[in-house]
Amino acid sequence: MPFLRSCHRLVALMLLSGCLANTLHAGTPRQVEHALGKEPIEGEPRRIVTLYQGATDSALALGLEPVGVVESWLERPMYRYLRDALPAQVRYLGLETQPDLEAVASLAPELIVGARYRHADIYPLLSRIAPTVIAETAYDFKALLELLGEATGREAEARALLAAWHARVADFRCRAAARLGEAWPQRVSVVSFRGDHVRLYYDGFARRVLDQLGFLRPEGQQGSHWGIKLVSRESLPAMDADAIFVFMRDDAAVSELHRRWTSHPLWQRLEAVERGRVYRGDPILWSMGAGILAANRLLDELYAHYGLHDETREGEFTSC
Amino acid sequence: MSRAVILRAVGGRLSLRLERRTLTATLLLALVLAASALASLSLGSQATAPGEVLEALIHPERSEIALVVREIRLPRIVLAILVGACLGVAGLLLQGLVRNPLASPDVIGITGGASLAAVCFLALGGAALGEAWLPLAALAGALAVALLILALTGRNVTPARLVLIGIGVAAALGAGTTLVLVLSTDTTAMRAYVWLTGSLYAAQWGEVAGLAPWALLGLPLAMTLSRRLDVLALGDEMAIGLGTAVRGTRFALLLLAVALAGASVAYAGGLSFIGLLAPHIARRLVARGHAGLVPATAIIGALIVLHADLLGRVAFLPRDLPAGIFVAGIGAPFFIFLLYRWRR
Amino acid sequence: MLNTPLTRLLGLALAAALALMAGVASLAFGATTVAPASLVQAFLAPDPGSVAHLILLTERLPRAVIAAVVGASLAVAGALMQTLTRNALAAPSVLGINAGAMCFVVVASSLFALRSPLALVWMAFLGALTASLLVALLGRERGGGLSPVRVVLGGVAVTALFVSLAQGLLIIDQEGFESLLLWLAGSVAGRGLEGLKPLLPFLVAAAAACVLLVRQLNLLILDDELVKGLGQHTGRIRLLAGAAVIVLAGCSVALAGMIGFVGLIVPHMVRALFGRDHRWVLPGCALLGAGLLLAADTLARFLMPPQEVPVGVMTALLGTPFFLHLARRRSLAP
């Protein structure tokens, strides 16, 4: 992973300040503020249980090895992009909706990471098992990384990862602007084909990443609502934009629907289609990962789609 | 030789006549329930010996598994028992009220009302208020629907009308629930779907405390009303002849059934079938007469939910699956078998 | 009530006109506005370059055809069921037949990864058959007849059974759940005519059975004793009509998912107009059922644009007041 290597290099640079901060923390518990309250955490917890995918992603990014994780929804039991980084003896705790609490307790974790939308009702139990931090939303991978860094005493690493991310974002914006000229910033649509409908995302993990990169949302796709489900090919014009990002899972029914929709003349008439600006994305990265690693891989995809030279991969943070 | 036992209380004003067979069956059932609860307390994704479990119950400070036993398993088991008992008895009351063995809270829309309220609560960002309000929203939905059904039924609460109107209302509520599900985000829809199926996952003492008053008031009340159910079973004319205020009794029974069912659905989600199944099994085990049926039904309902939840917890480890799946999956075929036998 | 053959014929013509109007509306209205002129042109002189023509021919026409077929099937199935069970509240959705078909399809597609349309259709039939047998079993009274309230309650119990089984399967599969949610809600949108093709032989057979049985069905309304006295055996008629119900309901579910209440409302409207003679009731049901679903589907496009309300939700919301009205009336005989 070239990107990770570069991150680690940067992390090494910033470790000095980090070490200093950590030694200061030792002894007195830190008050870590999260979505459902404040949690006193002592030292640097290493036995970590992550209860949703974004947390697993972020923990691995910080170089932590979770002792327990929940099953993924696709590529079971764990997304391939995270699978290799997980320790072999990691314990799977069942589904994200109802993780096995006894197993969590038996792992004797030092820290549990959950998300408000899934774990608000079990938070009281979780916090009795171990110190627990809860992320506010599923989309904000930066806030999650900071929260996790603070909770595990790895603020420095978290900061370094975010700095690397911001550097990449700046690099991408600058290169995209240089390459596309007048056509930048582009208005883009995020579309996902499903078995019986098509989704047009107004908000979500991928949309937030695209926002940071400077992509715009087409008119009519503004609101804070997650998006809409389209069922009739007649609604195809609703997804028109300068570019369309498409993701879907590998499934016979989905491919059939995709074939039906993309063979329709209205699809052919979309501006993005006419200009050849329809890009396929990995469904895991675009909708399921929701962590800093997924965000960086998503950005890798974008560099490739736009044919931009990704110097940040070599670890040189030259803004172009 | 007398085959019945008569229990008297409150200076003889309250008396219950119970057959020997009923008493034996009830006692046996209670024993089975106690044994099941103990077994359930010892089973989980972490194997624990019954001895350790007892140790954790009696001397929590000395036990390493006190948290697992006392905070994770025990409240869940207690809630399962309460929910099962309430739903079973609610079904029994409704069946007696409607004089039809196929009525139950989910059939006449009480569960549907709670479901729509809960799903709306989840989809419209009720989580911002705190999940603790979810049971209240669901309960309010159940009560509102019961009132709506009563209003629609009009003055003559005839059983057939009540059921049919309940079914119609349930269908509209189901459509509303579907609409909200279709419009909400995936995670909300999934959360709502799990709720609709019915799950006791991560039950905590707070929830037990929320349901307990309803159960502790409602179940004894059902016992005291049981004789009126017996009278209603004779038919309206006979009941009136025996001096029963049929309409008032029906109203009181309906309200009690709604309260029991609404409260349990509020804490456990849209569990179905228990209200249908438990009374049927009870009728096969104990002698006729509601005084014996109420406790038997309560215990059987508790047994069903307890075992369904146990299956959900341990059958597909590490997955912890909603009890509702198993209640329907096992209960429904059994129910159909019962009906088939009954035909012969 | 229309009493003479002539007025009834006129009534049928009127129903046909209504269905046609609903069909035209379903073609004319949608996310993109289509000028009335191009509506005609698209059929007489289709221009592959015109967006309006494309939308009409590739999207709205197949959708309208499917809505019409599903609406007609459900309404006729409802009429047959009401006659068979002698119950005014019988309909495929009320008696759990839709739920049975739905559950079997969900099991086939999520547990056994069956995806071919024909396999799913057979699963839908099997589910519809299972559900109807169960309901018949639960609804039978000691004497042997079907009790109206027992039948309805049995239907609700069977619905609860199949719906919770399907729910259980979908809970462990978030992706499958997302993909099936709209179909579960009932929708005729986005279906192509190729999905209709494998069902045509079944639908034609069911229609043929209805045509052949139309006179005998009238016997079923009569008293059992009377029929026996007339020397008629109703067993075979019941069996054939039951098979037609299962095929019609199974096809509808396979095509459009869970659409409720069309099979309940339409037969009542038709009987109010034409009386109880099946020679008039069945064609009337087919026409008005098609018209009603076409209208509901058209309306569903406008409530929350650009999103569509699933048509199954629309019919349930429209149908409930009607169901309640029926339930409040005393008599439950059709």
Image (spheres, grey):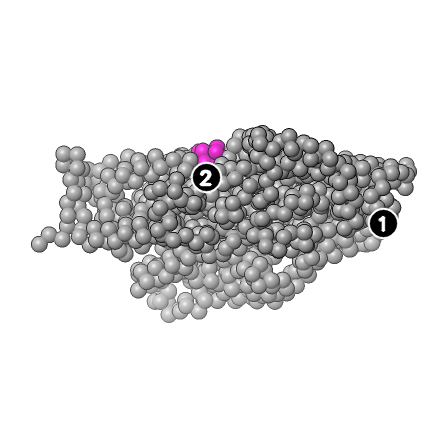
Task: Classify the position of the C terminus of chain B by image quarter.
Answer: bottom left
CA–CA distance in space, label 2 to label 1: 50 Å
Q: Is residue A253 left or right of residue B329?
A: right
- Residue at screen point 42% across, 35% down: B206
Q: Nearer the viewer, residue C226 or A262?
A: A262
Which amino acid, mark 2?
Ala
What residue is shown with label 1?
Answer: A276
In terms of image quadrants, where is residue C303? top right
Stretch of the chain drawn in magenta: B132-140
Find residue B180 and report its horizontal and vertical position in percent.
Answer: 57, 40
Above or below residue B293? Residue A185 is above
Q: Main secondary structure of the magenta part?
A: helix
Chain letter of disc 2 in the image: B
Find residue C222 and report its horizontal and vertical position in percent.
Answer: 39, 59
Find residue A16 and report its horizontal and vertical position in percent.
Answer: 73, 35
Find residue C145 and report its horizontal and vertical position in percent.
Answer: 35, 60
Q: Can you name the residue that lies furthest to the left here?
A: B1
Q: Nearer the viewer, residue C182 or B264?
A: B264
Considering the numbered disc 1 on the image, is that residue within a helix, a strand or a loop? loop
- Residue at screen point 58% across, 59% down: C110
In terms of image quadrants, where is residue A47? top right
Q: Residues within 10 Å of mark 1 (few under 14, many from 20)?
A: few
| Residue C139 seen from this side | no
Considering the numbered disc 2 on the image, is that residue within a helix, a strand or a loop? helix
| Residue A279 seen from this side | yes
Above or below residue C8? Residue A21 is above
- Residue at screen point 78% across, 55% down: A263
| Picture disc at residue B114 | 2
